[in-house]
Amino acid sequence: MHVKPAPGAARFAPNTSPRPYRADIDGLRAIAVIGVILFHFGFWPPGGYTGVDLFFVISGFLIASILDTETTRGTFSMVSFYERRARRILPAFLLVLIVSALASTTLLPNDLKSIGLGFINAATFTSNIYFSTLANDYFAAGGLAVQPTLHTWSLALEAQFYIVFPWLWLAGLRHPGWRRTGFVILAGLSFAASLWGVAHRPESTFYLLPTRLWEFLAGSALVLIPAMSRLGPVVRAAQAWLGLGLIAAGFLLLSPATPFPGAAALPSCLGAALLIAAGNGPHQPSVNRRLGAAPLAFVGRLSYALYLWHWPVLMLAGYGRTTPLPFAERLGLIALTVLLSLLSWWLVERPIIARRWLAGRRSLLAACLAGVIGAAALGLVLNLVGQDKLTLTRLPAPVLTLANGQFDTVKGECRPSDMHADVCRWGRPGVEPTVAVWGNSFARMWVPALGLAADPHRVAGISLLLSRCPPLLGVSVPDSPGCAAFNKEALAFIEAHPALKTVLIGGNWTSFTHDLPALGDTIAALTQRGRRVVVILPSPAALYDVPRSLALAALHHEPPPPLQSEAAARAALAGTTAILSDLHKTQTFETIDPFTALCDGATCAVAREGHALYADQDHVTRFGSTLFPSLFDPLFAP
């Protein structure tokens, strides 16, 4: 798509020839990337993360400058525009993704599910949306810290800006005045959304384009409103110093605890815009000339590669560490980042941008498409490993054995209509079931032990199980649609099968403290129907994700986390235990206490024989369950 010169365009746009190289903008890039890297590596300054916002303003200015110059001269081509963006961005980006994905095969399987999705979304420039979703998910937010692609959220934002902005520009090409007004309104709406979002939707506000667009438009405004760059030398010098001061204020006065972006991003963005505007014209202020000095300008030209490499280097080196990386090691990792950046800049970025490699448009498209598919495919492999659908054996066997505790769980739902399924029967084959276990995953995890305990007694049993659905009659659970109906059906099934003389009920009672009195209704309903009721008491919960924590300790040759004392574990359940004790005063039921199997009076075990006893913090693994069949012997005693 080529664009002819717009009528009267020269009146509104000062750029009737290509813009000269601005070394001071590369210097500003250098400040931005140095701030980000020092912040991420745990050095000073506390607000170094605002360097990303400087990049957004620079991108807004440069893209608007390209569009302004080329549409004014009638040389703009949408295909050529995106080809140049692809040459600049994709080759180095895809190289880093592929190398990082290959390096990630040494990570634990239980982290690779979300990491794999991170690579897939990074390859398609949607990682900001994916990470926003993770950040808003209470149970998944912790996974952000182990994402080698976390830094690509800002690159995804830039790519989305490149997709949207040129079309908006062209839409207003014949009416520059309207275009300026439209972009000012759009920037105002975006800033207002950012102010609102910081208070009400902070995670989405941080990652998504609608609440970040104003930062790009702050740079574009310098082109849309040329008068901003047509000031006298004294004013421009003052504006350059003010801009530098505002950037420094963002670096020094903000911290990770500052609500961001919103108003907190304004000084950095305004400072960058002032500095860029001050440097327009033949006689730059001293601040801009110093920014354009050769060392800073070179770091600025290297800034894209530095940004790409620094995060995966830091994350992979610090993966799973329980203490901060030592000072010397962090310096070494920065040196490695610089080395990798120089190599990729020299061997990939420069030759492809200069068309020494992949000179043709088709060859560039083919190479980039292959890179995107390759990076996404590696992400899919990592995701499948994280779902236990593929196995990578690059981890030491003891580490992998511990890590695989994540997958060592009892699976399968057992509704009354599923009683023909093998997964829903346990104990002696060919014997009519006389025991039912009713509950959710906290009952299901004990089925292997129940089967082992029942067989010597020539007893069989059945399972009535629904995930996230405790056996509390009349209680609705938002995370388990149909829970109330399932419990009603389970009770009806037990009533319809008189041979089921004993009912074992279990659930995550601590998660339903407010609803736990309803357990009395369940017990009463069963005893009224002549059933013997046995309640599985809460198990001791670990203080950490057991498979991951033990595997990481083994991976780094560190001692495992300390065991929790039995006294502390029981104290943590005191509120739930008190409610169950009160139920004993009004209802008739027996109890089975998992503490007697998992604890020894002093501490509570989390592993045995090199295997995790828990699949997370509180679900017992299949391996762990099979160790304790004697726990359920009282259930089958004559």
Image: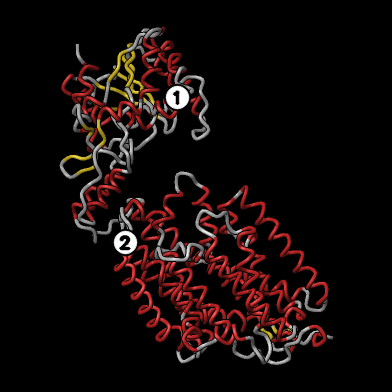
Location of residue 333 by image quarter: bottom left
Residue 499 seen in the figure: no
- What's under tag 1, amino acid-wise? Thr
In depth, the one of 301 and 389 nearer the eye is 301
In this rendering, the answer to whether 433 lies above or below 28 is: above
Which residue position is annotated with label 2?
325
Q: Position of residue 629 (x, y in %)?
A: 20, 27
- The CA span between labels 1 and 2 is 41 Å
Residue 26 seen in the figure: yes
Q: Position of residue 296 (x, y in %)?
A: 49, 83
Q: Which image quadrant: the C terminus?
A: top left
Q: Is residue 524 left or right of residue 278?
A: left
Dot 1 surroundings within 10 Å: few (below 14), some, or many (20 or more)?
A: some
Q: Position of residue 270 (x, y in %)?
A: 65, 70
The residue at the point 20 percent across, 29 percent down is 602
In this rendering, the answer to whether 306 lies above or below 260 is: below
Q: Is residue 566 left or right of residue 342?
A: left
> What secondary structure is found at the residue carrying circle 2?
loop
Location of residue 390 by image quarter: bottom left
The residue at the point 50 percent across, 24 percent down is 484
Dot 2 surroundings within 10 Å: few (below 14), some, or many (20 or more)?
A: some
Q: Which mark is residue 513?
A: 1
- What's under tag 2, amino acid-wise? Leu
